[in-house]
Amino acid sequence: MEHVLEPILARIADALERLAPPRIAEPDFTAARLFRHDPAGAFLAAPDYPLALDSLVGVDRQKGRFVENLQRFAAGLPANHALLWGVRGTGKSSLAKAAFMSIADGVSDLKLVEVDRDQVSALPALFDILRARAERFVVLCDDLSFEEGADAAKALKSALEGGVSGPPANVLFVATSNRRHLMPRTNTEDRGLIATAEDAEEEVSVSDRFGLWIGFPPMDQDTYLEAIRGYAKRHGLEAPDLERRALQWSVLRGARSGRVAWQFIRDLAGELGKTLPL
């Protein structure tokens, strides 16, 4: 009987092995400073962010406050999770990455892990992995909002609070969002007024877990032109009608922002036959 069962059990074991999720290799955080956390749970090394911190203009107050908080975290001092919120194109994500690079140059064990906003539910497990590491991690989620509803909000709260063991001391969570309270644009008819209100309360309460809120207001014309002149000088671009053309570009785009300014500079560089780092 045993001889009959052995091949059957072997086939069952092989089948279970094939059905099991692939084993994730132990992450090698010495390979890079920036990583992406993919849906399968692997840490993918990414190239260093090329934009210099001093090239971001019009956000000096935001820059100073964020860098100060990040420097404290890198030094092992108390620091707050940060929410960078405001209108699109004002440099929220660029500031987070450029500030990290400026500080990581002198702190070898400081790493940045970027997660997709659709992976919010995986944050508690990710934080548990990072908790056991000797390195210090900035976990960045760009354009965070809770389109999935209250379940995603609860997952993020769980990650930031850390359950019975408390939040990991070596993890700083940074989120960017166009919305101050991370609220999705949902239809109350889908779930009813009471359920929608409860979900809204859950989502708004997540914002309270961020000790540092940094707002990015719309860019005025003077600041926009300052960004244009700064980018042009940095990259050696000259045009006799630079500001007039930059203003026309912003009118065609219907907005003034750091992103619009950079897009104009890219267009000008292409016209002049020059290359840019981004």
Image (tube, rainbow, N blue to C red):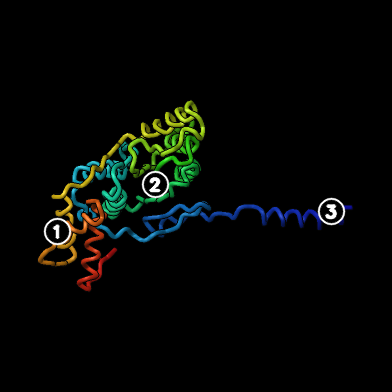
The type of residue carrying mark 3 is: Leu
Image x and y of residue 24, in percent: 54, 54
Residue 253 position, x and y percent, is 26, 55
Taking the view exactly as shown, the residue that stands out farthest to the right is 1
User: Which quadrant, please, contains the C terminus?
Assistant: bottom left
Q: Is the C-beta separation of discs 2 and 3 under 8 Å? A: no
Kindly indicate the quadrant of the structure image that contains residue 216.
top left
Q: Residue at x 42, y 59 (%)?
A: 45
The disc labelled 1 sits on which kind of residue? Answer: Arg
Name the residue that disc number 1 marks: 229
Relative to 6, does residue 172 appear above or below in the rendering? above
Q: Nearer the viewer, residue 244 or 259?
A: 244
Of the two numbered discs 2 and 3 on the same chain, state the one appearing first in sequence.
Answer: 3
Number of marks: 3
> In which quarter of the view is residue 7 placed?
bottom right
Q: CA distance from mark 1 to mark 3?
A: 78 Å
Residue situated in front as seen by the camera: 11 or 106: 11
For the question of whether residue 63 can be seen, the reply is: yes
Q: Residue at x 39, y 46 (%)?
A: 141
Please report whichever mark, 2 or 1, sits nearer to the chain's N-terminal start: 2
Q: Is residue 106 visible?
A: no
The image quadrant that residue 270 belongs to is bottom left
Which amino acid lies under the numbered mark 2 shown in the image of this protein? Cys
Q: Residue 221, how many percent across, how many down?
A: 15, 50
Verify CB contact (< 8 Å) between mark 2 and mark 1. no
Name the residue furthest bottom.
273
Instruction: Name the mark on residue 196.
Output: none
The correct choice, above or below, for 6 with respect to 64 in the image is below
* Residue pointed to by mark 3: 5
Residue ID at (51%, 51%): 39
Lower sequence index among marks 1 and 3: 3
